[in-house]
Image (cartoon, rainbow, N blue to C red):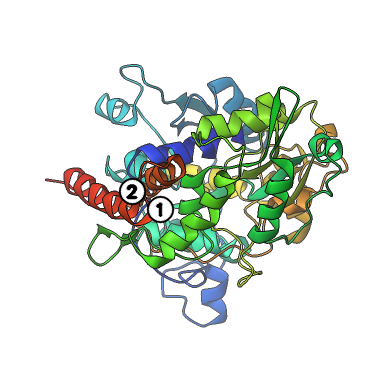
Amino acid sequence: MVNSKVRKGVSAVTATVITVLMAAGCSGGGTLQTAEKEGTVKEGQPAKPVEPPQEPVELVIYYPYVSDWDEAGLMQTFGEPIKKKFPYITPTFIVGDSRPGRSITDLIAAGQKIDIMFCSIGATPPTILDPKLEYDITPLIKKYGYDLNKLEPTSLDMARQIAKGGLYGLPAYVPPSALYYNKDIFDKFGVPYPKDGMTWDEMYELNKKLTRKEGDAQYYGLSMSFSGAAQMNARKLNPIDPATEKANINTAGWKSFAENFIRFYQIPGYSTSVDVSAQFNRFFKDRNTAMFVELTGIHGALLEGMNFDIASFPVFADAPSAGPQPYPTYYYIPNTSKVKDQAFQVISYFTSEEFQQQKAREGKLLPILQNKTVKESFGQDVPLFKGKNTKAMLPQTYGAPSAVTRYNGIATTEFYNAVIAVIGGTKDLNTAFRDAEEIANQKIQTAKPK
């Protein structure tokens, strides 16, 4: 599932208009318990969480990408646990695709009932904001005494940015931010395996040692997605100026960030093809690449038969504790739902320790909770991940989120195109980034509501 989800999210981020709006802290806005402690519970609020209604009800749950999940997969992973936990709730799933009538706008226009929506942060604008389905769940959080403090704070902060201080949904899960590596290639060339905490400079040296030709076979040191790296950058670089809503990538910071990756593809013998799919296939399918910087998914099925392990996401030498930004998926309740209380009951369960630990142990989802035991339980019931360094799949600390707008995807796509142009030798760095920013601004003007 998650194997392509965020890759699709990143692809949606690459191809679409992405993400969202601005600002607020990661605690506060908070829980009923916190309000009670601080003496701020207002008259009319319950002193204790109330019980949700338990009459029979159908909940329709929408997911936008058929390439990630089909309805049977969603029912197995999410629906069966709902039915077991809440026998009075009948879940039904709809998966969006390119066929007429299956997009979210077509479904809403046809009067389709939808009660919960799963969306990555990149898919949120076209799926939630553009169709004007947003609904602030803060009253439900207070009504049912939901404790926001248990959630990973950076993902929660990003959700508040989306809702301009409110909350349209709860963070659901995140993709791994880690380094997968093929031990057989390291063994073949007698190169030591990567370690947790390695810097990009150390990765570059590994890349030089592992990019070589053996007979007719070409081997590569590293593959990755530049567009994903830009969106989840650990430098807190803003692709869009939130005050002007103009692209902000023709800067010294963005050029330096790009140069860090460009050098990997200028090593003699390295192919200049940096297409995201080609990068992905070299590691997972062709298996001629030693390392893959993972930003998008777990890819369990694609790792079958590979002698792999995992190391932590590379860091910059001058900021060794700064991990990448998260790329969370959220559970949203659209404003059209007539059963918001039951929908909130379900998304609360999806973010419970019970559900999160179960899906983590099954190797299905990486937890969104701060609970260390839950976070470290990933893959414990899955032979594929036995003995693997799965704790490296989540950074110790996520990087602070960039200021995000609904046009971030346009700018990060043009960042990606600039990187390709420099690696391919069609443009120098300054020209590539000047052109990229100009093109991004033209696309932003076209994308703005008329």
The Cα atoms of the two marked residues, 1 and 2, are separated by 6 Å
Whichever of labels 1 and 2 marks the residue nearer the N terminus, that label is 2
Residue found 46% across the figure and 45% down from its top: 227
Q: Secondary structure at mark 1?
A: loop
Asked if 218 appears above or below 413 in the picture, the reply is above
Residue 445 rendering spot, x and y as whole percentages: 17, 49
Residue 421, quarter of the rendered image: top left
Asked if 142 appears above or below 310 in the picture, the reply is below
In the picture, which quadrant includes the N terminus? Answer: top right
Residue 167 visible somewhere in the drawing: yes
Q: Are marks 1 and 2 in contact (CB under 8 Å)?
A: yes
Q: Amino acid at mark 2?
A: Glu
Q: Amino acid at mark 1?
A: Tyr
Residue found 61% across the figure and 33% down from its top: 3
- Residue tagged 1: 168
Residue at the farthest top position: 99
